[in-house]
Image: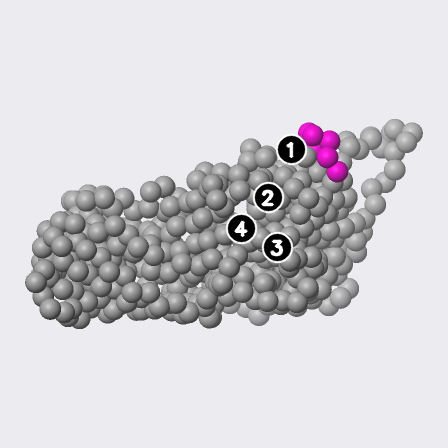
Amino acid sequence: MRSVSRWGSSALEKNSNYSIENHRSMVLDDVRVDAYAAAIRRVARGKNVLDVGTGPFMLLGRFAAAAGATRVVCVEHSEESAATACELMQCEHEMAQPVPLPVSHPKYEPPKAVGAWTPQLIVPAPERAQGGDAKKSGDDGGHPWHTSNGGWRRECVSASKADSYENMSARTLHVLTRRAKELQECRELLAELGADCAPSSLSISEAWYHPRWIARRRDSALPLFIAQVEAGPALREGRHAVRVELHHGLAAHVDLPGDVDLIVHEILGHVASSEGAVKAIRELRARAGLASKSCVVLPSEAGTMLAPTLQLEPSLLERLLQYSETGYSETHEQGMYHARGFPPSAFLAPAQPMEWHCFNGELLCRQRRVLRFRTTADGRFDGLHLHLRVVLDATTAIDAYAQRTTWSCVYVRLFSPARAIWLAAGSLIECVCNVDARTDSPKYDIDVSIARPGDRGTWHAATFSWSGDGS
């Protein structure tokens, strides 16, 4: 159990703060990956696919390409994730090329420069890290340019110098070597998942090579790259190449190709709507000419399940772990926590949906639900347990409580041990849940009322409000 803020960051802030390790852990989540891969394989063949919030691995888009999609358009808002996705595709394109002939071979030809610039990945910028002013190059291409992500820069080397390591410091070479190793590990991981690519051609936007790449690329009508890709399974089956594009920016602002048959996304938080999925999908479905009449969104539904809980009695080990992370061994009244492993006996009643979103039907930004629980056992009521449930299609679903995934469950402690409320079996716990997902930082309110057996009406017990999912 880990204490988290009730007032979490917005979806955009959260996405910008995701590290490559965060994304790697999601790719290693067998429950999520297997469910999405299976669902995409069933519907992607011959479709024009849009992958929203594709991440550095473009995983869902790659699954669609492997399943035989006609066209795959991926969109990513995070600067670093977009950069990594581009670098991975470049790496795969280079690895897919024939082994070059030695210089002494009679048919040897010098390699052609891809463009005016050869980007050399992301390296630490000591000037920014030490608080100095960021250096920006002119358009002559000789100097590194510092991105807005404090402490890092994009090291660029002109094509005329790309073959000479003498122009790089030993530190830069070390970082580039380490980064190349990371990309190779990513390629191997994608190959294990059947999401490896073999781009037969790769066309990269000139804006990618420009030092001021953020300003020129974000929300641009031009993709970062266009690749003709034979994904692993497709390559082995001899199918035709798939056109894959990557765009940098918010899906709502980027100029995207129309006639989309399938929208795939994984922008779901520990609380279903907390990462902006409702707002994003509503905007995409409302855009004229983007989605075809038969367009399907995957996952088809998602929601947050809620159940009242018995008073917690943590073990000594749990108290020690809590203390090591927070500095105190007890959970606090009106506190919010990411939690795992609640035993079924800790619930006073079966879970019900606090919010439920149908991405292929009427998708409401605001929901008000009244949940009425009848307690199944005697006990002291002290809080609420929330967990994500995702329905990808008619045959595949993910339950973050029943299955171990990178999505955490959420525990809300309403009362201190001294104020926990004794309820006999058959008591009524009424939760009035309000969800407002109109912004990038959705807001949630729960009003809790109680009635014991024999009471003529309910009485108000607690209120809890928060935004985001604490991440």
Do residues under tags 3 and 1 come within 8 Å of each other at their CB atoms? no
Residue occupying the point 63% across, 54% down: 294
- Helix, strand or loop under label 1: helix
Tag 4 secondary structure? strand
Q: Nearer the viewer, mark 2 or mark 1?
A: 2
| Residue underneath mark 1 | 233
Q: Are marks 4 and 1 in contact (CB under 8 Å)?
A: no
Which is more N-terminal, label 3 or label 2?
2
What amino acid type is highlighted by mark number 1?
Pro
Gap in Å between the C-alphas at discs 4 and 1?
21 Å
Q: Which residue is mark 3?
A: 295
- Dot in front, 3 or 1: 3
- Left or right of residue 74: residue 370: left
In-image side of 361 versus 256 (left or right): left
In which quadrant of the rendered view does residue 184 lie?
A: top right
**Callout 2: helix, strand or loop?**
helix
Can you identify the residue that label 2 sits on? 43
Task: Report how far apart the C-alphas of labels 3 and 4 lie in the structure.
Answer: 10 Å
Using residue 327 as the reference point, say whether residue 93 is left or right of it: right
Name the residue rendered at 72%, 61% in the picture: 222
Kindly check if marks 2 and 4 are in contact, taking CB atoms under 8 A apart as contact.
yes
Residue at 88% x, 28% y: name it: 105
Q: Which residue is mark 4?
A: 298
Looking at the rendering, the stretch of residues picked out in magenta corresponds to 235-240
N-terminal of the pair, mark 3 or mark 1, is 1
On the image, the x and y values in percent for residue 415 come to: 16, 63
| Circle 2 residues within 10 Å: few <14, some 14–19, many ≥20 | some
Residue 381, horizontal then vertical, whole percent: 15, 57
Amino acid of disc 3: Cys
Q: Is residue 237 magenta?
A: yes
